[in-house]
Amino acid sequence: MNGFACKANFSPSDFFSSGLAMPMPTDNMLGFTVTPANVMQIPGLNTLGVSMARADFAPGGLNPPHTHPRATEIIFVLYGELDVGFITTTNVLVSMTIKQGDVFTFPKGLVHFQMNNGKEPAAFIAAFNSQNPGVQAIAATLFAAMPPVSNSVLSKAFQISYQEVDEIKSKLGGKP
């Protein structure tokens, strides 16, 4: 089901993970790290329709605009403060600042983001109503696709020059 065969010989470890317990390093260009706990890490989630993740943010860290095509997401802030938001299908931004103990929901398939504008680290635990919610990062999807999306499409869609398209592609690992 959903691309995963049921295991005939399972064990308790197929239903367990300790991966969300500890913060992960955030020393990358986005200042953000996500630790998934989905069917790929916990095979026992197969067919159960649930999964989780942990997100850790450095001060200024960003989980860039993205979607989960197969799940609604709900987050619980462990510590810190985050600016969060999603964009409706009528291009309305729904956003607010949330802090430790707060909960916020991102509807299935809508573009959303989280950013730590604070001076201290922040983290949240996310729950999804899918064993494998998927993730599609908007910038990487468009500017680092293989084979590449043509510069003429991206230039016209974003009203930028071919040179600017190439610069963005090079920063995101795409081929100009």
Image: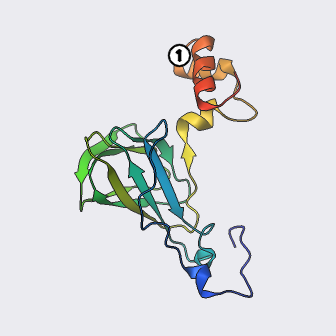
Q: Is residue 142 visible?
A: yes
In the image, residue 87 above or below residue 8:
above
Kindly identify the amino acid type of the residue bearing the numbered disc 1.
Gln
Q: Quadrant location of the N terminus?
A: bottom right
In the image, residue 27 above or below residue 159:
below
Which residue is at a point 59% across and 18% down the rendered structure image? 167
Q: Position of residue 36 (x, y in %)?
A: 52, 61
Displayed quadrant of residue 61: top left
Please give the count of numbered marks on the rendered protein.
1
Q: Position of residue 12 (x, y in %)?
A: 59, 87
Q: How is the image coloured?
A: rainbow
Q: Quadrant location of the C terminus?
A: top right
Which residue is at a point 64% across and 87% down the rendered structure image? 11
In depth, the one of 52 and 72 nearer the eye is: 52
In the image, residue 122 above or below residue 2:
above
Q: Which residue is mark 1?
A: 159
Q: Is residue 149 left or right of residue 32?
A: right
Q: Position of residue 57 (x, y in %)?
A: 38, 47
Which residue is at a point 25% across and 41% down the rendered structure image? 119
Which residue is at a point 41% across and 58% down the rendered structure image? 23
User: Dot 1: what SS?
Assistant: loop
Q: Is residue 4 left or right of residue 107?
A: right
Displayed quadrant of residue 157: top right
Label 1 Cα crowd, 10 Å radius (few <14 / some 14-19 / many 20+): few
